[in-house]
Amino acid sequence: MKYEVLKKDKTDEETSGHALHDYDKMYASFSWKASEKEFVSDDGCLNAAYVAIDRHVGTWRRNKLALIFEDEAGFIEKFTFEDLSLLSNKVGNILKDFGAERGDRVFLFLPRTPYLYISFLAILKIGGVAGALFSAFQEQALFDRLEDSSTSIVITTSQLLPRLSGIRKKLKNLKHIITVDTDDFKTSVANASADLRIAGTRPDDHAFMLYTSGTTGKPKGVVHVHKAIVHQAMSARLVLDLKEDDTYWCTADPGWITGISYEILGNLALGITTLVFSGRFDPKRWYTLLAAHKVTVWYTAPTAIRMLMAQGVSLPKSFDLSNLRHLCSVGEPLNPEAIRWSIKAFGRPFHDTWFQTETGAIMIANFATLDIRVGSMGKPMPGVVAAIVDDSGRQVPNGTEGNIALRPGWPAMMQAIWKRLGKYHSYFINGWYMSGDHGTKDGDGYFWFIGRADDVIKTSGERVGPFEVESALVEHPAVVEAGVIGKPDELRGEIIKAFVVLDKDQRSKIKNQKDGERLKEELMEYVKKHLAGHAYPREIEFIDSLPKTRSGKIMRRILKAKELGLPVGDTSTLEEY
Ligand code: WTA
């Protein structure tokens, strides 16, 4: 196997400042038990919001900046650890007044404004289970998640509220919707007590959940527990290399796991000043933010890096980015080209990291002091045992393609799929957690990503299940059936492509190309409006029939092979083709 190696300086001077100096030594000696001691109190209780915020208030960090917010218009708001402690106490008391109890699901449907972060912490403090809903979600996506989780309270803004109004009546367990940008809420916050007894949650109590997509069925609720913060904090230290004086910017949205694990929990547990930008992606603006806030550590995603790359190196060179010292990437394959470009643009490489909603924290990564094999995801985080196994869970020889698998036992591992025990157990085979990703491991323990083992789509780093998109499409009166795949795309990694079988009458109405284009536009808009702004098919193709198994399952594998001009493989189980 041929690859490029970026050698890291191994002199003492260079490595001594990093939490991880010698990977092999630390990997051999690391223990989660020892790590826990730093975060868990002696009485055996662990509340992740306490660890992230209140723990610091009794130390010199009390007046340290915790979160800096900048919005699209350039308005900046800053919160110290004490500010966040008091405000989350107040919101915790407000939630209690609304009747929220331990174990209740309280969901956040909010853009990246301070109350998203404050409310998340407040929910954990009262022992509730916080759920995050990406702000691009529309009615169907919202309904599925709120219904399945039996959420009792949703926190939102007046701008997003209308999307909940239409489904509110159908949600039997939903008792309250709290709108944070109203005068009412502001008065409640002003009047609420800032004293709150933080719930004495245990390390294994549920803390938050995120819905995520698989190949089939509706999205599933991945449940995480309070002790996940031990892993999130340790990986923020060892992989993101966060240190006391850093200004750290994570570009993810807390509607996804990266935004929760590394924009709220892991980073704040270490007491790190964190920047949150709620505006849209724009290369010039991003560089302006990096320079103006003197960002030192930056965690972003390959699609964004490729979009920056498309603007060339002269733009970043025109900014003072000399404070940047460590760059990391997550969510989709990081192409070697992007690493080479980042060396030209910033004088340093992006470090790829790999994890999933289900793993809750970084599992495999390129470390600041470890040589980078360009194109590899790196090595397992200390405390994590990773391997490549076959479908029956047996390890395969180095260099052989197989399933990326992990030995259960890391603290951030999901502890349940909400109400679906069978689904949860189906992740484990022969003592391994099966990630659903394919890859290889080389002789020196570096992992290389190959692709998904299933039909899950990654578009601009966001995870979309084909079934959800197909279901949204068939809701449209013109559509009889739909099959959805991820089509490789240079910029976005993948785009969503839908193969659509039209109703006979509709088909006869299409007289020319223009009619067809118009209907495609309409279908795209329909998915955007009903399911989610990011989950619509950017390409649609009308097709006479879909390839299916004899039992009636759509064979997306065949649609994909056809799209890519590849051999379609074994079609013996096909009903029609
Ligand atoms: C993909 C995101 C290649 C992978 C944190 C995984 C990656 C899925 C990488 C999880 C990477 C994540 N290289 N692929 N470094 N990181 N993935 O749940 O397919 O949104 O299974 O969590 O993203 O997506 P999720």
Image (cartoon, rainbow, N blue to C red):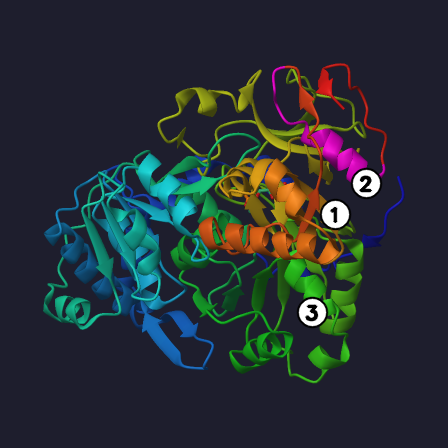
State which image quarter holds ligand 1: top right
The magenta stretch is: 551-565
The answer to whether mark 1 and mark 2 are in CB contact below 8 A is yes
Residue type at numbered disc 2: Leu
Q: Is residue 293 visible?
A: yes
Which sits earlier in the primary sequence, circle 3 or circle 1?
3
The residues tagged by marks 3 and 2 sit, at their Cα atoms, a distance apart of: 27 Å
The residue labelled by disc 2 is 564
SS category of the residue bearing label 3: helix
| Residue at (85, 29) in percent of width and height | 567
Position of 403 relative to 301 (above/below) = above
Quadrant for residue 340, please give it. bottom right
Which sits earlier in the primary sequence, circle 3 or circle 2?
3
Give the quarter of the figure containing the C terminus: top right
Our reading of the magenta stretch's main secondary structure is helix
Give the quarter of the figure containing the N terminus: top right
Q: Nearer the viewer, residue 446 or 526?
A: 526
SS category of the residue bearing label 1: strand
- How dense is the environment of label 2, judged by Cα within 10 Å: few (below 14), some, or many (20 and up)? few
Say whether mark 3 is within 8 Å of ligand 1. no
- Residue 167: give x, y in percent of width and height: 30, 47
Residue type at numbered disc 1: Pro
- Residue 33: give x, y in percent of width and height: 42, 35
The residue labelled by disc 1 is 488
Mark closer to the observer (3, 2): 2
The residue labelled by disc 3 is 308
